């Protein structure tokens, strides 16, 4: 036989654990995967967006700066072409030209100068005293002599202030002369410094040697020759803008976008901290983490809760199965005991009959003359009579036992409720005596017969009697059975004055497997079967009880129409 | 002259012996048999037996079978069934097959004797009717 012992707690706790883990794993894995995938996609698209923004910015400003430089260069070229060396060598005339330029360009031009082939400034118009200044050693002068024009890097020069020079070469009487203009550094610097990217991003210009051509607004990458290296490493976009990332002197990671300007001599660089550029993305990451954690917490809580509930149900079902198995064993045992009892009851009738007949024969013999004088004749007769009486009693007991042991007969027949009750009371009398219970019956005269199965009615009433006797087993008490007619119903009441049923249990007494008896004593099926039988008869069974006062079961069965 | 000539059939020897003594004492002429085949044999040998008291539950050949045989061979012989409770159904079955009545063990002796008397009387009445019918037949032919 299969082991029906109750499974220990470790089995159920491991079942609950496995169930929870499975649910958690199955729910969390897709959630984390999907969140990760979405974040990854979002990161890519966000990065592209930031990059595109920076590229656009750099392109626009590269254009602006190039236009600014070309415009200034164009002006100087026009000036050099329009006027002769002699005209421009006149300081007053030059001063007029500078004023005109300053008027139209908001002081973008600081000064103008005419330099001869030896680097001597022959005429000068501007705020500094630079007349007759010698530029033969100036870094811009050598290329200016050979190229049609030069736009220098920013340098301090003779005046000791950062500035840069636009120099245009002209020829007069086969000698080279140069018209030189200084561009206001502040005006130029503003062009770049006004480029603000987000909250803290900024732009700056470097020359080929990596020297700053504008004042950077914040700290930049600290490396001897960083930008050309980074530029080589980063693949340029279609518009020749290089985008790369690097860590600056403050140990902050920045994203850079760089583009060449001034015919590849200068480099315009935009710099934005990664933390700022990706602030939205980082916010999304944080939100996702919070959501995943919250979702995970919910899943874990639900998984544990649901698993526990499921396992409790399983445990309950196991318990019920176990009780049911016990019932089956008990029922089988009862059935065989019943058969055995029926066999014994029948077999006992024969020896009892012989005993009674032998007693009768002795009685016959006492009638003869020789025994009539015996002084104990009366006592003998009384004893024989007693044997006969007890023989009849045996017959009555076996009769009841046999009628009950017969298989439950569900045939519908005319049943006299009174007779059934009286019969069952006789059958239970012995048990009641041992339990010190007095049984009283109150059957109304002239009750109509019921059209039901006698065996089933017997089963119901006997069950109620047995329950009452069980309840009063310890202290004894009174059991009363009554039957009366109420309108078109016959009402049977089985009332005891036992300990009663607590209110909490009263609602459940007709539930299958509900029992308060000790394990192995009650099946928890009796009343549910009674309920089923009475319902089948078209009747009602109800119970009322108060603790300490007793319990009354009321069965009401409709009379035959 | 005995009240009735009775064949008592039961496999319980002690029961048969005691009953025989008691019934004899009350003026019945009792022959004992301890099983169905023996009862049939006795009936074949002794045609004077009027009533058979037959236990239902017996080995080899039970009361119902024995009853059927008796009724087949000796239709006028009356049979009273004796039974324990569990065989009430078979006693009723016996009634259907022509038993005179049935009694439950242990039974009241007076009640049993009463039944035997009734059974014997019915047998005599039946025989009387048959004789009358035969006489009528004979006289009818003569006239």
Image (spheres, coloured by chain):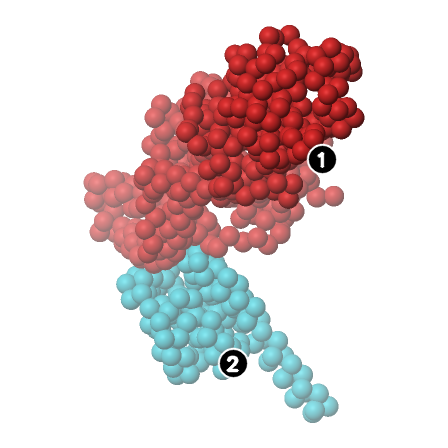
Chain colours: A red, B cyan
Given the image, what chain letter belongs to the residue carrying mark 1?
A
Quick one: quadrant of the C terminus of chain A?
Answer: top right
Q: Are marks 2 and 1 on the same chain?
A: no
Q: Is residue A213 left or right of residue B39?
A: right
Q: Is residue B25 left or right of residue A182?
A: left
Residue denoted by label 1: A488
Residue drawn at point x = 71 percent, y = 87 percent: B140
Tell me which residue sits at (25%, 47%) in the image.
A372
When the figure is inspected, residue A310 is found, relative to residue B115, above or below; the finding is above
Who is closer to the viewer here, A6 or B138?
A6
Residue A349: image tag = none
**Vertical placement of residue B136 versus A19, above or below:** below
Instruction: Look at the picture and state if A175 lies above or below A126.
Output: below
Q: Which residue is found at the position 41% from the left and 58% from the top?
A: B84
Mark 1 element type: loop
Q: Residue furthest front?
A: A173
Residue A313 appears at what percent x and percent y? 47, 39
For mark 2, does the 10 Å Cα neighbourhood hold few (<14), some (14 to 19), or many (20 or more) residues? few
Secondary structure, mark 2, is helix
* Quarter of the image where the N terminus of chain A is located: bottom left
- Mark 2 against mark 1, which lies toward the viewer? 1
A436 and B38: which one is in front? A436
Q: Is residue A472 visible?
A: yes
Q: State the image coordinates of residue A317 (x, y, percent, origin top left).
A: 45, 43
Q: Which residue is mark 2?
A: B72
Q: Is residue A359 or residue A466 the one in the foreground?
A: A466
> Based on the displayed image, in which of its 4 quarters is residue A134 positioned?
top right
């Amino acid at each position: 036989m299969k082991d029906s012992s109750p499974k220990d707690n470790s089995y159920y706790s491991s079942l609950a654990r496995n169930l929870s883990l499975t649910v958690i794993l199955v729910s969390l894995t897709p959630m984390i995967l999907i969140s990760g995938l979405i974040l990854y996609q979002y990161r890519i698209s966000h990065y592209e967006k930031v990059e595109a923004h920076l590229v656009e910015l750099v392109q626009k400003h590269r254009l602006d700066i190039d236009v600014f430089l070309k415009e200034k260069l164009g002006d100087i070229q026009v000036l050099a072409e329009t006027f002769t060396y002699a005209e421009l060598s006149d300081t007053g005339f030059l001063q007029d030209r500078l004023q005109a330029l300053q008027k139209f360009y908001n002081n973008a031009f600081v000064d103008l100068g005419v330099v001869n082939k030896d680097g001597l400034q022959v005429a000068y118009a501007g705020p500094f005293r630079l007349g007759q200044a010698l530029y033969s050693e100036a870094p811009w002068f050598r290329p200016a002599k050979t190229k049609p024009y030069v736009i220098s890097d920013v340098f301090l020069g003779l005046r000791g202030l950062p500035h840069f020079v636009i120099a245009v070469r002209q020829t007069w009487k086969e000698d080279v002369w140069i018209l030189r203009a200084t561009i206001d550094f502040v005006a130029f610097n503003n062009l770049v410094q006004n480029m603000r990217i987000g909250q803290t991003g900024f732009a700056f210009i470097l020359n080929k040697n990596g020297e700053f051509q504008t004042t950077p607004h914040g700290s930049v990458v600290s490396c001897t020759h960083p930008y050309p290296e980074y530029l080589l490493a980063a693949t340029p976009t279609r518009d020749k803008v290089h985008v790369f990332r690097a860590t600056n002197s403050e140990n902050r990671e920045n994203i850079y976008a760089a583009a060449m300007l001034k015919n590849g001599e200068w480099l315009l660089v935009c710099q934005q901290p990664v933390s700022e550029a990706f602030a939205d993305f980082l916010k999304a990451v944080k939100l996702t983490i919070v959501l995943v954690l919250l979702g995970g917490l919910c899943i874990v809580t639900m998984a544990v809760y649901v698993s526990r509930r499921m396992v409790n149900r399983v445990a309950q079902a196991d318990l019920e199965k176990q009780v049911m198995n016990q019932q089956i064993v008990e029922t089988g045992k009862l059935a065989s005991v019943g058969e055995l009892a029926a066999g014994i009851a029948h077999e006992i009738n024969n020896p009892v009959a012989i005993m009674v007949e032998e007693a009768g024969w002795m009685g016959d013999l006492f009638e003869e003359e020789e025994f009539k004088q015996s002084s104990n004749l009366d006592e003998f007769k009384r004893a024989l009579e007693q044997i006969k009486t007890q023989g009849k009693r045996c017959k009555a007991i076996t009769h009841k036992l046999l009628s009950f042991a017969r298989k439950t007969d569900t045939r519908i027949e005319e049943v006299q409720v009174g007779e059934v009750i009286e019969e069952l009371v006789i059958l239970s009398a012995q048990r009641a005596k041992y339990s010190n219970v007095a049984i009283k019956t109150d059957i109304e005269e002239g009750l109509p017969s019921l059209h039901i199965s006698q065996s089933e009615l017997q089963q119901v009433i006997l069950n109620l009697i047995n329950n009452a006797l069980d309840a009063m087993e310890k202290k004894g008490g009174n059991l009363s059975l009554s039957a009366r007619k109420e309108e078109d119903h016959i009402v049977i009441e089985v009332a005891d004055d036992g300990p009663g049923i607590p209110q909490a249990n009263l609602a459940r007494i007709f539930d299958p497997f509900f029992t308060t008896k000790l394990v192995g004593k009650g099946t928890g099926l009796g009343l549910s079967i009674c309920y089923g039988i009475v319902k089948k008869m078209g009747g009602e069974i109800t119970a009322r009880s108060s603790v300490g006062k007793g319990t009354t079961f009321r069965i009401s069965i409709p009379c035959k129409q | 002259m005995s009240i009735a000539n009775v064949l008592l059939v039961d496999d319980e020897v002690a029961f048969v012996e005691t009953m025989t003594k008691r019934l004899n004492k009350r003026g019945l002429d009792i022959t004992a048999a301890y099983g169905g085949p023996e009862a049939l044999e006795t009936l074949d040998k002794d045609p004077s037996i009027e009533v058979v008291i037959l236990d239902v539950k017996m080995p080899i050949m039970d009361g119902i079978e024995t009853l059927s045989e008796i009724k087949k061979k000796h239709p006028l012989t009356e049979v009273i069934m004796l039974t324990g409770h569990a065989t009430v159904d078979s006693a009723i079955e016996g009634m259907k097959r022509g038993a005179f009545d049935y009694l439950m063990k242990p039974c009241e002796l007076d009640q049993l004797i009463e039944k035997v008397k009734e059974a014997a009387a019915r047998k005599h009445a039946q025989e009387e009717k048959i004789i009358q019918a035969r006489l009528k037949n004979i006289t009818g032919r003569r006239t």
